[in-house]
Amino acid sequence: MQIPVERAETFYLPPSARRPEDWSAIPPAERVFRWTEQRQQRRVVPPTGFIIGQQAYARINHNRWVADCPCGSAQVVSPADPRMACTECGLGWVRLVFPDDPGAVEQSVSADLPHLRNWWNFDDPTNPYRVVQGETDPEDEDPEADDARFAEETL
């Protein structure tokens, strides 16, 4: 049986004493607020408006769709509700950028073990594998040339 990539609607579930469908009326992006109240015993209120001009990129990290907040926090997100607000710093709603076909991306990592399933949006400026036009890939550089350059600089 294939283990699906985790999304907000399957990650943020009510306590075990309640049925999962008890939260079915809550949009996936807002479930993190209810989950935080239940699990961390912290009262957090979802923001009421969007931050204009701000966006975050969704990525797959260890088999979960996640998005990072500028404060350093992150949360599990869903392409079914492409927005995020931070329960840590209180950042308002920001638009999430998902790939055009999230299902195809999930399928592209499905052969990997769940803990090895990772994917970054190419346009994400924090993507560590992104090579910008004009830059060189560090793995393509000649280590002997670097050693020679270092020897010249230290003389």
Image: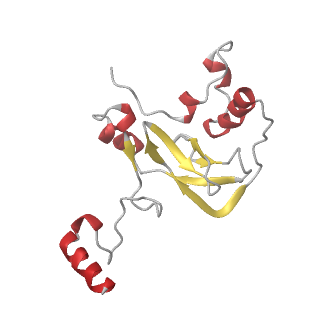
Q: Position of residue 144 (x, y in %)?
A: 18, 72
Q: Position of residue 108 (x, y in %)?
A: 30, 41
Q: State how many labels appear.
A: 0
Q: Position of residue 7 (x, y in %)?
A: 51, 35
* Left or right for 70, reference 103: right
Residue at the farthest top position: 17
Nearer to us in this view, 71 or 49 = 71
Nearer to us in this view, 40 or 82 = 40
* Left or right for 144, reference 42: left
Residue at the farthest front position: 155
Is residue 142 shown to the viewer in this render?
no
- Residue positioned 36% across, 59% down in the render: 129
Q: Considering the image in quadrants, where does the N terminus appear? A: top left
- Residue positioned 32% across, 83% down in the render: 154
- Residue positioned 41% across, 52% down in the render: 120
* Left or right for 67, reference 113: right
Residue 138: quadrant of the picture? bottom left
Residue 50: quadrant of the picture? bottom right
Residue 125 drawn above or below residue 36: below
Q: Position of residue 33 (x, y in %)?
A: 71, 37
Is residue 132 shown to the viewer in this render?
yes
Q: Considering the image in quadrants, where does the C terminus appear? A: bottom left
- Residue positioned 36% across, 44% down in the render: 105
Nearer to us in this view, 14 or 62 = 62
Rendered image coloring scheme = secondary structure
